[in-house]
Structures are given as structure tokens and as C-alpha cells.
Image: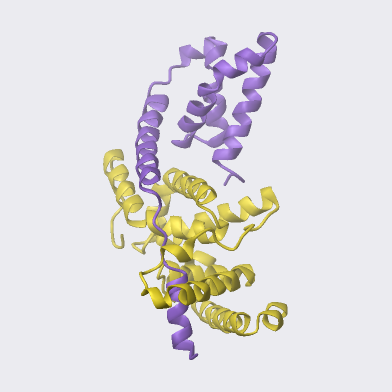
Amino acid sequence: MSTTEFEARLRAALHPVEPREDFAVRLERGLVELRDLAVDELEGWELSAMRDPRNWMRPAVATVVGAGAGAALVVLRVRGRHRRRRAQSTNVLDLAERTVRDLADEARRIFPGGD
Amino acid sequence: MPDEPVPHDKAALDRSFSELYRTHLRDVYSYAYYRVGNHHDAEDLTEQTFLQAYRHYERALRESDGRPLRPWLIRIAHNLAANYYRDRARRPESAIEDAAVISAPHTTETLVEGREELEEILAGVQQLPDDRREALIMRFALGMDNREIARALGKTDGATKVLLHRAIKQLEGIVGHPEEAAAS
């Protein structure tokens, strides 16, 4: 088999792979939501909210991952697991610790290795 | 999207990113698929790639100087895939899930023979050193030229040409004489 023939077979073997349609749609929708969330999170931020410890998570995330749109995704995912953490916690301090750990894990997952 | 100026407002930047996403989703997904060997992890890697890209898109546009952004996207996927293997301390468990099955239609007579041959080639690709395997994926699955591959891998055009040549030669050896070539 000549190299040209071999390359043709290689091209046939390594053909482009189409993502599943539901994945493509879901990812695009996620990116749009991410953009909207980022705008809400970053523009809607008020310093007065800092008085309430429940709001400390957001600037903490922004510090960890930078003021990028990805911060909103971290918040969204961590916030989405709030009920589960609350059920697992024995007291408020335990809940706070679990939240911080979850936050750090999620930030590392979204931005592995940082930049 | 070469020669596109950096949009000044956020909405235009987002539209521009959406176009980039639609244009290159298949490229990123294909690359991810051939790196990790299954659809589940390929989806995860593709998602992470576009999240990272979205985060740094404005700067990338500024610094691209009008050059296509596909190598930049693939480089992000390449780095994330490296982390994927490092974190999980693994390589693809099986060669490739079912890639050969999706290839172009064959006649009934040649189907079995052709499929076996493609699977043999895919298995050979998985045996190549990382840089050679990646160069082949970029060239044949994504249709990238030498210059684009060089940018994605952070190499010179000349080094990339040599890399591709050696990758093809080694793969030919593996497919022809599996035991000897894999050891070389």
C-alpha cells in the first residue's frame, strides 16, 4: 500500500465525529445562560449585600476564578447543591464549611489548573 | 474567523463567540473524542473547552491579529485533555468506542473487511506517542494544515511537518508489523 493510499485510509478512520444533537443544543443554551448569569451577577452586585454573610460566596468565587463569566457558573452549580449540603450539615458552621469546600471544588472543576 | 476586528460591545462579542462555537463545535468535539475515546468524556471536555474559551475570548481575539482561532480552541482542548489524563492517571481504556462504525457507507462485501482495517488503524493511532497521535488527529480528523497544527501544538511549521511525516511512517509500521513498530 502506498503512503497516499494509507493516508486515504487514515482519513477514513479518523473522520470528524458529530456531537449528539441534544448535547450541542444543551451546550449552546448553557453558554447563553452563562452569559446572562454573568451579567446579572456582576452588574447586580451591591456592596451593601456584603453585610449579609450569605452573600459572601459570590465575591469569594470572583476572587477565586476572576471576574469572568465562569464565576456565574460556579455560583449556579454550588447554589444548586445548597439543599443537599444543608441536609448533610449538623449546624450552621458545618454548613458554611461544606459550602466553602464545595465552592473550591467546583472552581477547580470549571477552571482546572487555573491560568 | 480571520480578519475579524475585536467587537467593542458585549453583545457583539457574544454574537462573535456564538459564531465561533457553531463553526468549531465539531472540530473541538472530534478532537476531544479521539483523545479520550468515548462520548461521555468527550462531551465533558468539549464543554470545559468552550467555557475556558468564553472566559478568554476577548483577549484571544485581540492577540490573534486576525488569524483563525481554531488552533487556539484546540490548544485549550489539548491542555484540558492533558489535565484529564494527569488527574485521572489514565489513557483511553479501549481504543475508540465506535468511531469506525460511523464512517462513510460501504458496500456489503467490503463492510466487514473495511471496518476491521479502520479499527486496526485507530488502534495503531492509540499506540503512537502523544504528540504524533495529536498531530494525526488534527490533520486527518479536523483537516488542519501544518501552520494551524504548529500553532495548536506550539511548534514551528518545520517541526510539525517532520512530526506528521514520522507519525504516518510509524503508524504504517504499526499497522503492517504491529509488534515491531510499537516497540520502536
Q: Residue at x 58, y 33 (%)?
A: A106
Work out whether residue B82 can be spotted: yes
Rendering colour mode = by chain
> Camera-side residue: A22 or A30?
A22
Chain letter for the purple colouring in the rendering: A
Q: Residue at x 59, y 44 (%)?
A: A114
Q: Identify the hue of chain B.
A: yellow
> Camera-side residue: B122 or B74?
B122
Above-or-below relation of A25 to B110: above
Total marks placed: 0
Q: Residue at x 39, y 37 (%)?
A: A30
Above-or-below relation of A62 to B102: above
Q: Along the horizontal axis of the image, is A99 left or right of B52?
A: right
Point out the residue furthest to the right here.
B183
Q: Position of residue B129 (x, y in %)?
A: 64, 71
Q: Quadrant of residue B125?
A: bottom right
Point out the residue furthest to the bottom here.
A2
Q: Residue at x 59, y 80 (%)?
A: B175
Q: Position of residue B81 (x, y in %)?
A: 58, 54
Position of the N terminus of chain B by quadrant: bottom left
Work out whether residue B155 can be spotted: no
> Camera-side residue: B46 or B53?
B46
Q: Along the horizontal axis of the image, is B123 left or right of A6?
A: right
Q: Position of residue B50 (x, y in %)?
A: 44, 47
